[in-house]
Image: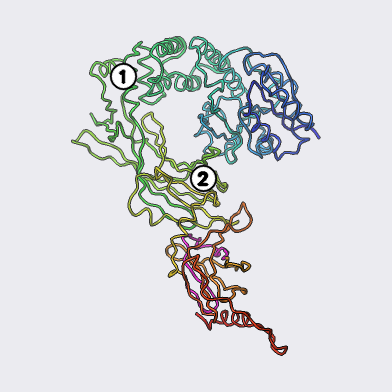
Amino acid sequence: MSVKVSVVIPVYNPGEYIEDCISALLRQSLPEDEYEAIFVDDGSTDATPARLDEIAAAHPNIHVVHQESSGWSGKPRNVGTALAKGEFVMYVDNDDWLGDEALERMYRYGVENGADVVIGKMAGKGRPVPVELFRINRPRASVSDAPLMDSLTPHKMFRREFLESNNITFREGRRRLEDHVFVVETYLRAANISVLSDYLCYYHIKREDASNAGFQRFDPVGYYGNLREALDIVEKYTEPGALRDSLFRRWLRNEMVERLRGKRLLNLPEDYRQEIFTAIRGVVTERFGPGVAAGMQPTQQIVAALVVDDRLADIEELARWEAGIRPVGRLDSLGWHDGALKVGFTAEYQVSDQPMTFRSEGGEDLLDPPLAEETLARIAGLGVSTLAPVERSKVDLVVRERSTAAEFFQPVEFTRERIPVGGDSAFRQELRATATVDPETAANGAPLGKGIWDIFVRISSCGWTKEARLGSTRADQVEDGRRGALSGPPHRVVLPYWTEPHGNLSLDVDLATSRIDRDVKVLAPKDVLVGGGRVELPIPVEVDRTAESGAVALRFKAAGVAAVRTEGVLTARPKGAVLTADLPDGLLPGHTWDMGLGLPSARRGKPRWTPLPTALLIAADGTITTGAAGTPSVAPAVVQRPAAPKKKSSFPSRVAGRIKRGLFR
C-alpha cells in the first residue's frame, strides 16, 4: 500500500522530550504501512542518535538519517522531505507530539477538500498557539477570508507534489523565521487550505528548561533581517493594496508592536530594548505604508506611530500603563439546564485594580490613559486616533484541559453595559454574559474528554485580548447550582468544583479527580430511607430531565462477609436526583453494612466507587436502621443449628425474603 503521510522530524539534543514525540507517532491510528516517520538527526551529541536507531530497528516505518550539525531546522526538514514517499508531508518538532488520530484525520480532511495545506488544531503547553483560527472547521480557506496568518509555524501537513512542483523548500543555515518564509509561500500559492478544528492534532510544547530554539534571546539585526525575507515573499506573490497591507500587518502587529507593549517590553534590559526598537523602526520606515498600521486597533496604532516618530521613552510610558491592565470576571450564576451547564458572569478590564475608564467627547468614545500631557499632545500631533471602539468589545468563555492545554470556545450571549463614573463624560464598560457548556458538544461539536477542564474568561476590547480564570469572585447563590451531572451516553459524571486555594471554577469530566467524594460525603444517615425491600437516598448529581434515568450502583460491605451490590436508577428532582435500588440478597442480619455509591465512568467501563458516610444496621431479628459508617455490628451473628430435613430454607434467607417484602423497616 502506498504511503499516505511522511512525518519529518528535525532532531537536535532533545533529551527525554523526544520520548513523547516517539510514543505519539507509534500510537497513530493510521496503519503502519500507510505512514512513515523520518527523523533527521542534525548532529545531536546526547543519547538521542542511539535511541532513534533502536526505534528504527524495531519499526519498519521509522527511518533515521544522521548528518553533521547544520545549526537550525531548515536543512533537516529539506533532507527529510527529499526522502519522503508520502502523498502528504507533516512537519513535527522533536519537542512536540501529535494527537493519536492526527495523521488519519488530517489526511482524510485534506483529500476530501482537495487541500495543498492542512492545518490541524493546536494546543500550547507553555507557549502561544492560534486561537481564533480554530473556532470552527474551515474546509476551504485562504489568507483573504481566514486568520491563517495567525499560524506561521511549519507544524502542518503539505501535499508533497505541491511542494515539489513549486520548488518550495526551507531556507537553510542558522537563521530565524525560516518557517515564516516557507509557510507564507505555501499560503499564497496553494489551490486550497483546509483547517481542521474539531480534533486536537498538534501539541506545541515549551520545555521546562526553556531551551526550545524559539525561546532564546535573539540578535535583533539578524532577526529583522530574516523577517524582511518573509516580506519579500508577500511582495512577490501579491499586488500593492489592501491584501498586501493586511498580510504585512501580521508582522507589524505580532513581531514589532506587541514586543513594545506592557510587561513584554518592560521586562527587557534597557540596552536590549533600544536594540530591538532600532531594528523594528528600520523595518517599519522602510517597508510599511500607512495602510498597514491603519488596520490595527487604536492602542497598536499609537505604538506604531511612536515607532516612526522615534519616541521610545513615550512607548515605555505607555507600556507602564498597559502593564497594569488585566481582565476580571465575576461568576453570577451556575446551574444545569437540559444537560448543559449555564454559566452567568460579568467581565471587564481593570487598571491597577480599578475599573478601566473611558471618556466621551464630541459624541465619540476615547481611551483615557493616564499619560503625561506632553506624551498625549505628541500622540495627538501624530494624527493617531485614540478612539475606543467599545461598541465592538466582546467576551468569550473558554474551557481548557489542564494536562494537554486543549481549549475550546463555548457559545456565549452577552450585552455591553456603560456605567457612568464620576460625571457625564467618564464611564466604564461591563460585559454581562451567559455561556452554555454542553459536555457532549463542547469540544467543537464533540464530547469533552476525560480530565480537568479549567474555565477562562477572554475579553477582547480596544486592542487588548486578555484572559483570566473565573470563579474566585462569585455571588453567594452560585454554590446552590454547583453540583455534578450525569452526561452521556455513555454515562459519565461532569462535576463543577472550586480549585484550591484560589477558588476558581473547573470541571472534572468523567471522575478524573476524587472531588465527587466531598459532595457525596455530606449525606447523613437521616437522608437514607429504607423500606419495602428498597433503599432510597438523595445524590448531588443531576440527570437530564429529557433523557432516561441513568443506572448507578450501591455496594454493601460488612466485616468478615462477602460484599454484595445492587443496581439502581437516578430520578430527577428539582435539586440533584434520588437514587432508588432494591436491597440485594445476601445482607445477613447481625452486621453493619457500610454503603458505597458506584457512579458510571465511560473511560473505566465500570462504576467508580465512593464510600458513603451511611451504613445499614441489620439486627439479628432482621430489623433495619441507618447509622454512621463504621458502626460496630449491632448484634452477634446468629448461629444456625442444622435444620430438619423437611425445612427448605435457612433463617437468614427467610429474613432476607421478609426484608424484600417490606415487613421490616
Q: What crowding class fits label 2: few (fewer than 14 Cα within 10 Å), some (14-19), or many (20 or more)?
A: many
Name the N-terminal-most of marks 1 and 2.
1
Which of pointers 1 and 2 indicates the residue nearer the eye? 2
Q: Left of 24 or right of it: where is 300? A: left
Circle 1 — which element? Answer: helix
Q: Nearer the viewer, residue 578 or 333?
A: 578
Residue 391 image point, x, y percent: 34, 36
Residue 388 image point, x, y percent: 32, 30
Residue 134 image point, x, y percent: 54, 36
Q: Left of 285 or right of it: where is 653? A: right
Give residue 206's mark: none
Would residue 126 be counted in the magenta stretch?
no
Residue 651 image point, x, y percent: 62, 83
Instruction: State if disc 2 and disc 1 touch (CB < 8 Å).
Output: no
* Region rendered in magenta: 529-554
Circle 2 — which element? Answer: strand
Q: Which residue is mark 2?
A: 452
Q: What crowding class fits label 1: few (fewer than 14 Cα within 10 Å), some (14-19), or many (20 or more)?
A: some
Query: What amino acid does circle 1 point to?
Result: Glu
Would residue 532 be counted in the magenta stretch?
yes
Is residue 662 placed above or below 349 in the rendered structure?
Answer: below
Q: Which residue is mark 1?
A: 317
Q: Left of 36 or right of it: where is 490? A: left
Which image quadrant for residue 288? top left
State the residue at coordinates (25%, 17%).
Answer: 377
State the residue at coordinates (33%, 41%).
Answer: 416
